[in-house]
Amino acid sequence: MGTVVEAANKGASGSILQKRNPTIVFVLGGPGSGKGTQCANIVEHYGYTHLSAGDLLRAEIKSGSENGTMIQNMIKEGKIVPSEVTIKLLQRAMEESGKDKFLIDGFPRNEENRAAFEKVTGMEPSFVLFFDCPEEEMERRLLNRNQGREDDNIETIRKRFRVFLESSVPVISYYDAKGKVRKIDAARPVEEVFASVKAIFEPKNEKAD
Ligand code: ADP
Ligand code: AMP
């Protein structure tokens, strides 16, 4: 079995989606910065389809797939699951949805994710929504999340913070240099954060220029 990039080079993937020319918004921010919470609001108001990389990976574990145990172990350690797994899940979800406006939440998590996604799908995000939040606040939120997540314990949370700083922040910097980052102060109450989100999603600003 080849990698996703090899598959793309053979022209094996990306085409169905590419033809639909979908709008893609990457939603990034540290663990607990409120990505999922705000994505739910954006779906409700602006008709996007929300795809959370973490949710797709957790569903893959539950489905009993051959990769399930590997994914579960990586999530427990706060590590980044290999691109070929995550990108396949995202591509499948986009194709099966039949929709053309996507919020991709929690992806790309590192430079390799980013480069592989662009190469495999032939698509780039219109812009990147970045929820900026201090670690102390994110830690408080995650410890109170109460969704029974195996990775919401202090030891894994600290590992996830380190991975975010070392691997994901450079991705945000990459898109910032291209003028594609829309940064939001996410340390405020949900409604205030959403007021800033709305200003970005109003129709005239929907596509980055
Ligand atoms: P992420 O998807 O970035 O990991 P979530 O949206 O799941 O973050 O939010 C983490 C926790 O913090 C949840 O319990 C959520 O209800 C809560 N939360 C989200 N946004 C805020 C906010 N602006 N202020 C306080 N708590 C929040
Ligand atoms: P999240 O639900 O976004 O908090 O993600 C939970 C965990 O899933 C992360 O700590 C990673 O282990 C894994 N994960 C989520 N998104 C990705 C991704 N894009 N690439 C690789 N692993 C991911």
Image (tube, rainbow, N blue to C red):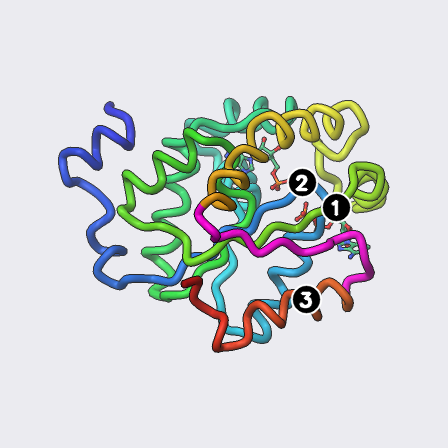
Question: Which contiguous range is marked in magenta?
Answer: 178-190
The label number, if any, that marks residue 30 in the structure image: 2
Q: Which residue is mark 3?
A: 196
Circle 3 sits in a helix, a strand or a loop, which is it?
Answer: helix
Is 117 on the left or on the right of 143, as rendered? left
Ligand 2, seen in the image, is in the quarter at top right
The residue carrying pointer 1 sits among few (fewer than 14), some (14 to 19) or many (20 or more) residues within 10 Å by Cα, namely some
Tell me: residue 80, above or below residue 32: above
Circle 1 sits in a helix, a strand or a loop, which is it?
Answer: loop
Circle 2 sits in a helix, a strand or a loop, which is it?
Answer: loop
Q: Are marks 1 and 2 in contact (CB under 8 Å)?
A: yes
Q: Residue at x 70, y 32 (%)?
A: 151
Q: Is 179 a magenta residue?
A: yes
The answer to whether mark 2 is within 8 Å of ligand 1 is yes
User: What amino acid is at disc 3?
Assistant: Ser
Is 127 on the left or on the right of 123, as rendered? right
